Amino acid sequence: MKILIVSKQTEVTDDLKVLFDKKLKKFDKFFGDKAEATATLKERKNNDKKVELTINVGGTLFRAEETAPSFQTALDSVMSSIERQIRKHKTRIQKRIRNNDFAKATADLPEAEEEKEFDIRVKEFDIKPMTAEEAILQMNLLDHSFFVFENEATGKINVVYKRESNSYGLIEPVK
């Protein structure tokens, strides 16, 4: 597994790098060398530590984030969250990755539960061309956490959303 550690508002010590390397090697039994892990470390104002972990395996993403008093505690929580995701979606993952090593490593995992149908609520609405700023205003008026709109400049469907830090994000399609 390729591991990338990114730090924001903190310094990554060698001990921390060794800890993350050791802990993330646990996922090698599931994915082998084909996975890429990105761990983002942040130190908050109140001295809490936040770990965001994203693992990309053949286009399948596993992501978890946790805030705790120490990076080690946050990493342990994130690791268990991702392991739960793997167990929950075992059969789907096996089909998408199509890797014999992954199938052998997951053979000892408990069988995944039958995938339940989701209760999906469908909404239809007109999408009007607008700027990202107009979309943010519309989102705030509706008191939603995201808003789908057609970008006036590109003609493509975009999404604006509220971030944890009370800022906004914009999702644009690549193609």
Image: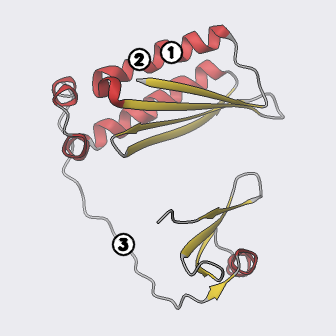
Mark 1 or mark 3, earlier in chain: 1
Residue 155's spot in the image, x, y percent? 57, 81
Left or right placement of residue 30 versus residue 82 in this view:
left
Residue identifier under label 3 = 120
In which image quadrant can residue 9 be found? top right
Rendered residue at 76%/76% (across/down)? 133
Residues at marks 1 and 3, CA–CA distance in whole angstroms: 39 Å
Tell me the amino acid under the disc marked 1. Asp
Tell me the amino acid under the disc marked 2. Lys
Residue identifier under label 2 = 25
Left or right placement of residue 46 versus residue 142 in this view:
right
In which image quadrant can residue 25 be found? top left
Residue 22's spot in the image, x, y percent? 47, 12
Q: Nearer the viewer, residue 169 or 82?
A: 169
* Dots 2, 3 in contact, CB < 8 A: no
The numbered dot on residue 21 is: 1
Mark 2 or mark 3, earlier in chain: 2
The quadrant in which the N terminus is found is top left
Secondary element type, mark 1 = helix
